[in-house]
Image (cartoon, grey):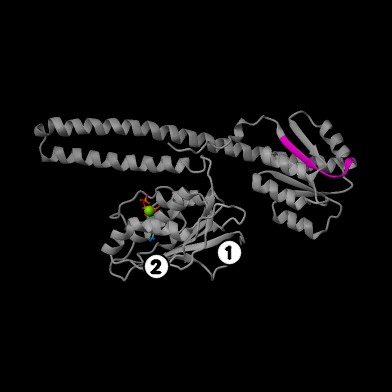
Amino acid sequence: MSTTKLKNNRNTREDSFNILIVDDDELVMESFDRVFSAEENGFSVDKTTDARHAIDLIEKRVYDLVITDLVMPEIDGIQVLRKVKKANPDTEVILITAYSSSSSILDAMYFGASNYITKPIDPAELRLHVRKAINRRKSILERDRKIAELERLSYTLAHDFKASLLSIRGFARILLNDYSDKLNGDGQFLLYRINANVSTMESMIEGLLEYAKIGKLEINPENINTAKLINKITENFKPILKENHIDLIIEKQLPDVYFYRSGLLTIFANLIDNAIKYARYDAESYIKIGVSKDRVNSNANQLLFYIEDNGIGIPQKNLKLVFDIFQRCEKIMNKNGYGMGLAIVKKVLGSMNCSIHAESELGEKTTFYFTLPKKNPVTTNTPQNDGSQEITI
Ligand code: ATP
Ligand code: MG
């Protein structure tokens, strides 16, 4: 039984909008009081003149809106903003500043602030910005509610379908075991077909349930020795790689990453599985795994990994589509699969704010590029890197 806990459900929070105001100036705080006391109920406002206390509050509570001064002693508004966005990227942040043209404002916008207000604060302007921010939050909460409802529905349906399929399989088995002497060859063949189709549907539903689960459970990221993890995965693939004369080339000294173990296993296992499954057996096949050095990665905290193969390739029109559920390219229908693997990989990566895309030359090669967070320097659980060697199987 898994020890993971269900994520804190944001829908269980009180109905009011949680607002945090951070400003070291008592006088400015008073002007906020005048604005918020004039508003109708529905706001729950926390105020602090101490940015350190604000950081504590942000860690403990989900805020819909944070209004923070830009310039404060010790911890500035940008640090507060970054903390807020890390805790909950959807929280709206409004900056208070003495100057309307400052490079810090550009920084703030870059890190996700929705707007800024200049001092002295005009109550009408503040009220307008607060209303706008709250309206944006309302639509995001409504969107999340609808998604959660649809997910719940598909989860229930998938379970119901599974139960029905189980009984179809049971009845088909009884027919085959007890009545096969009463059926001719055609009848028996049709029963086998029913069984095969039931198996396909069961696998699709299993995939759908696995997909729905991603992001629902609490994940525990840790520093992971990527080379070791890939070696462990490829152990299982060794016989099939050997049988099909596929060279597996893993770059030396792969860097460690910060991810949750089961998620990382899913990513590499699915991408390697695809590279093997869609190899061209008329070529000297290879699969290369490494970190891209010639591409600019916009996020300094992430690494850009790649898995390249010289297999059948993916048509340009399908390059984005293949990441959707149950999408498979034409002309590969003799290969087993349900079109779930890449959708699961994309969602697992998304759960850690990472992304994936594919590039391909049809009939030549396919490369999947995906980002992974760099090793976390403050975590102490880094496993010993035993140095990865180049492996050719
Ligand atoms: P499943 O992973 O559920 O067993 P699948 O492999 O068909 O089935 P995905 O892994 O989601 O599903 O891949 C979707 C489609 O993308 C595949 O059906 C195939 O057409 C194409 N594809 C994926 N990887 C490659 C690859 N390395 N080379 C060529 N085509 C690929
Ligand atoms: Mg696959």
* Residue type (three-letter) at the residue carrying disc 1: Asn
Q: Which residue is mark 2?
A: 365
Amino acid type at circle 2 is: Lys
Residue at x 86% of width, y 39% of height: 29
Which tag is nearer the camera, tag 1 or tag 2? 1
Locate residue 62, reporting x and y percent.
67, 38
Tags 1 and 2 in contact by the CB under 8 Å rule? no
The image position of residue 12, as x and y in percent, is 61, 30
The location of residue 302, given as percent across then percent down, is: 57, 59
Q: CA distance from mark 1 to mark 2?
A: 22 Å
Residue 276, given in percent of the width and then of the height, sits at 34, 60
Q: Classify mark 2: helix, strand or loop.
A: strand
Q: Is residue 24 magenta?
A: yes
Does residue 277 appear in this view? no
Q: Within the image, what quadrant is residue 272 found in?
A: bottom left
**Dot 1 corresponds to which residue?**
297
Image disc number at residue 188: none
Ligand 1 sits in which quadrant? bottom left
Query: Which span is picked out in magenta?
Result: 18-26
Residue 89 in the image: above or below residue 304 = above
Give the quarter of the figure containing the N terminus: top left
Look at 84% across and 38% down and name the residue there.
Answer: 32
**Is residue 387 rendered magenta in the image?**
no
Q: Secondary structure at mark 1?
A: loop
Residue neighbourhood size for the residue with mark 1, other residues' Cα within 10 Å, grouped as few (<14), some (14–19), many (≥20)? few
Res. 142 image quadrant: top right
Q: Earlier in the sequence, mark 1 or mark 2?
A: 1
Q: In terms of depth relative to the viewer, which is nearer, 391 or 333? A: 391
